[in-house]
Image: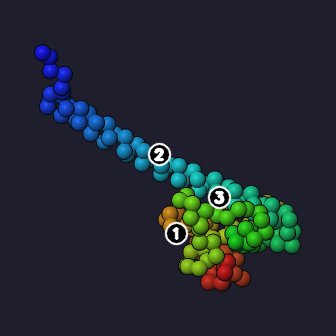
Amino acid sequence: MKNKAFTLVEMIAVVIILALLLLIAVPAIGAILANFRQVYYKNLEKELETASINYINTHRAKRPKDGDKKVICINELEKEKMIDKVLSYRHKKCDIKGDNDKKSYVLIEKKDNKYTYKICLYCDDDSYSSKCISSDLPNNVDPNELCK
């Protein structure tokens, strides 16, 4: 009678092959997820820029003059229904009201009749932040009072 069971050597070989596949797959999947996270936030920043353009076109009095800068708080964009709630990659609400030392806003600058938009977005629960510094803000804006 033939024995149809696996031998111990065959079982060890299968376990080793599965372990090698996991060693290859886990870092690759981690890299894919990290890349997806970055793409998510870049798309969110583009969406915020588009909302800011619409906001400035709707509220012409809030446009900066040539050589000037203006700040639009993201909660203002939400309040004006220019954008839905800003959620992090993990679908939690980003801190957009400036309750901590990091602020989320859009900085609009006008130079030579061209507008530039710099998105400053902080999502603490996901440790995401765009590279914004308070020295970029207009002189008449107090960083501590911004977006309350």
Which of 115 and 130 lies nearest the eye of the viewer?
130
Indicate which disc residue 124 carries.
1
Q: At x 55% / y 58%, what residue is drawn?
A: 89
In the image, taking residue 130 as reference, residue 78 lies left or right, namely right
Residue 47: image location, x then y, percent: 69, 56
- Give the distance between the C-alpha atoms of the residues marked 1 and 2, in whole angstroms: 21 Å
Q: Amino acid at mark 2?
A: Ile
- Give the distance between the C-alpha atoms of the residues marked 1 and 3, in whole angstroms: 16 Å
Q: Amino acid at mark 3?
A: Glu
Q: Nearer the viewer, mark 1 or mark 3?
A: 1
In the image, taking residue 88 as reference, residue 139 lies left or right, namely right
Instruction: Give the colouring mode of the picture.
Output: rainbow
Dots 1, 3 in contact, CB < 8 A: no
Reading the image, the residue beneath label 3 is 45
In the image, taking residue 25 as reference, residue 125 lies left or right, namely right
Label 3: which secondary element: helix
In the image, taking residue 58 as reference, residue 102 lies left or right, namely left
Upstream in the sequence, badge 1 or badge 2?
Answer: 2
Upstream in the sequence, badge 1 or badge 3?
Answer: 3
Label 2: which secondary element: helix
Residue 84 to residue 135: above or below: above
Local crowd at mark 2 within 10 Å, few (<14), some, or many (≥20)?
Answer: few
Q: Amino acid at mark 1?
A: Asp
Label 1: which secondary element: helix
Residue 126: image location, x then y, percent: 50, 63
